Amino acid sequence: MASITWTAVQLSRVLEADDVIYLADDDQQAQALTAALRGLLPQAPIFFIPSSDALPGDVAPASPANVGVRVAALHALRMAQQTADRAKLACVVSGG
């Protein structure tokens, strides 16, 4: 696994030219990468969308807190995309 700092620097370079979506291994890595990107690019719109906290195959739905964080992040991302002359944005998600 590449270091969070190295990955954040590489993504910040890509963000100079284009939007980025990054799939991290897990929520902890995604949160750390989001924090590193925000530190490198404090003015850039960078969004963290956590994975669902519902277990695969479980009949229980995701927790209300998890759903709220996900919906809020997706809403903020949608609003940022609609801004005229917007900056390039990054969306960091996790696979589990």
Image (tube, rainbow, N blue to C red):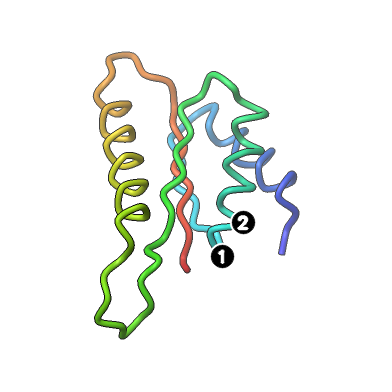
The numbered disc on residue 29 is 2
- Amino acid marked by disc 1: Asp
Q: Tag 2: Cα neighbours inside 10 Å, few (<14), some, or many (≥20)?
A: some
Quadrant of the snapshot with the N terminus: bottom right
The residue positioned 56% from the left and 65% from the top of the image is 25
The location of residue 43, given as percent across then percent down, is 54, 19
Determine crowd level at label 1: few under 14, some 14-19, many 20+ residues with C-alpha closer than 10 A: few
Describe the element under mark 2 as helix, strand or loop.
helix
In the depicted structure, whether residue 80 falls above or below residue 28: above
Residue denoted by label 1: 25
Residue nearest the observer in this picture, 61 or 56: 61
Q: Mark 2 belongs to which amino acid?
A: Gln
- Residue name at image x 27 percent, y 27 percent: 79
Left or right placement of residue 52 versus residue 24 in this view: left
Residue drawn at the location 59% of the way across and 22% of the way down:
42
Q: Do the residues labelled 2 and 1 touch (CB within 8 Å)?
A: yes
- How far apart marks 2 and 1 lie (CA) works out to 7 Å
Looking at the rendered structure, the secondary structure element under dot 1 is loop
Q: Where is residue 55 in the image (x, y as percent from the top left)?
A: 38, 77
User: As drawn, which residue projects farthest toward the top?
Assistant: 85
